[in-house]
Amino acid sequence: MPKYDLCIIGGGPAGMMAGIMAAKNGKKVILLEKNKELGSKLLLTGGGRCNLTHTNLTNREFALKFGKQGDFLLSPLSSFGVKETMDFFSENGLDLKIEDNKVYPKSEKSKDVLSFFRKELNKYDVKIILNREVSNFILEDKIIKSIVLKNSSEISAQNYLISTGGKSYPMTGSTGDGYLFAQKMGHTITELKPALTPIEIKEKWVSLLKGLTLYNAGIKLNNEKQIIGDVLFTHFGISGPIILNLSERIKSKDKIYLDLFPLKNIEELEKNIVNSIEENYKKTIYNTLEKIIPSKLLLIILNFSDIQKETICRNITKEGRRKLINNLKKIELNVVGLLGFEKAMVTKGGVSLKEIDSKTMKSKIIHNLYFAGEVIDLNGETGGFNLQMCFTTGAVMGQNIDN
Ligand SMILES: Cc1cc2nc3c(=O)[nH]c(=O)nc-3n(C[C@H](O)[C@H](O)[C@H](O)COP(=O)(O)OP(=O)(O)OC[C@H]3O[C@@H](n4cnc5c(N)ncnc54)[C@H](O)[C@@H]3O)c2cc1C
């Protein structure tokens, strides 16, 4: 009889959650991680703050954030959903805070989430082996007999979990190994694409704004309806939650239009600008508008409008004012393309949902194999949805493992 009930391959959020739940359930668990530490990607999440999950949605609304694939999550969410996840953290000592329905650790430090997982894994005696890369699975009649490590040693267990993550941010260890393992054992891997990806923009001036966030800007993709959200400028283009969510539908040569005053129409904006100009008629236009428009962006908009920074308000021509207002309402950005897996937050595609039992996360092809986390063909919007999917699939797997 193998020494372990469960061998987990990959120590990210999904693998760690599965390990804790299985061990809590009385199973002997071993977790193998190829990095020298667990949870390298977890540490980067939420800009280091770790957006753990998202509250205030029904399970159906939550599942919709995963598009067509979301239905798969309904059953797992009903047994380990957002509430169970938040209780799991807070009842075991990780205080949480909620901002705009997004849940973070109260300390706003992802390293505290990782320490929490390490503590729980230790509490339930999960054996963790770091610096161990799995390179192969030995199969006999649709049953995994053992796994082979890169150093050629073998480990055998009753059951195996592939929680190796996706292909995005490969420097964190997520290099797509799980897809190859699953495929070799007969699973279908749907097309893999980078998702939640920053967008590369043709206009070179965007790099001058690197690091600037425009809050509540109007964002319009081609002729679609305008949406409102935050836009972060990067040295090659734009990013930020709403842009990342939009990225799945964006392709090269698309146009994105930004509106700095989406809640005002042209006439209302014109009235405001005329008032500001009249009130500040002896000041420069730059000093006047700097209070309402980020200064670096203002310089660019003045340039587009052929207005010198030093121009005194009373000297602005009607034509200059018209151009200025049009530019404030519509900044055109031309899409070059999306950044690839290197900068994508998640991977679209993965192990086909048709081949996994959503009640247990068990493979429908290999008798003692399970999947959890990003390796599965599930990817959601930003806002804590992806980590929750990892916690949900990991917990359901751990709670339902066969003897
Ligand atoms: C910059 C960034 C920010 C993000 N922020 C958020 C956020 O705030 N909220 C949110 O919900 N989601 C966020 N995400 C997405 C989230 O991080 C992922 O969905 C999540 O980490 C996936 O978890 P996982 O356990 O499936 O895989 P991973 O976290 O990728 O972990 C897989 C582990 O398996 C190991 N592994 C791989 N192959 C092998 C092998 N052959 N042998 C042994 N070990 C192996 C890897 O080293 C890795 O440690 C973010 C992603 C990025 C890149």
Image (cartoon, rainbow, N blue to C red):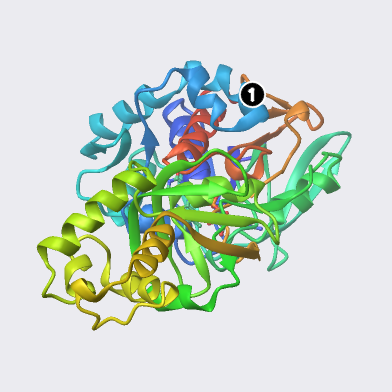
| Residue 340 location, quadrant | bottom right
**In the rendered image of this protein, does residue 93 appear above or below residue 402?**
below
121, 106: nearer the viewer: 106
* Numbered disc 1: secondary structure: helix
**Residue that badge 1 annotates:** 72
x and y percentages locating residue 175 in the rendered image: 65, 61
**In the rendered image of this protein, does residue 298 appear above or below residue 278?**
below
The C terminus sits in image quarter: top right
- Say which amino acid is labelled 1: Phe
Determine whether, in the image, residue 314 is placed left or right of residue 367: left
x and y percentages locating residue 330 in the rendered image: 47, 56
x and y percentages locating residue 261 in the rendered image: 34, 50
Q: Residue at x 24, y 76 (%)?
A: 315
105, 20: nearer the viewer: 105
| Residue 342 location, quadrant | bottom right
Q: Is residue 339 visible?
A: no
Determine whether, in the image, residue 45 is placed left or right of residue 193: left
Q: Residue at x 37, y 41 (%)?
A: 52
Q: Residue at x 55, y 22 (%)?
A: 76
x and y percentages locating residue 152 in the rendered image: 73, 65
The number of discs equals 1
**In the rendered image of this protein, does residue 283 appear above or below residue 182?**
below
Q: Is residue 52 visible?
A: yes
**In the rendered image of this protein, does residue 368 appear above or below residue 379?**
above
* Label 1 CB-ligand 1 distance < 8 A: no
The N terminus sits in image quarter: top right
Determine whether, in the image, residue 107 is placed left or right of residue 57: left
Q: Residues within 10 Å of mark 1 (few under 14, many from 20)?
A: some
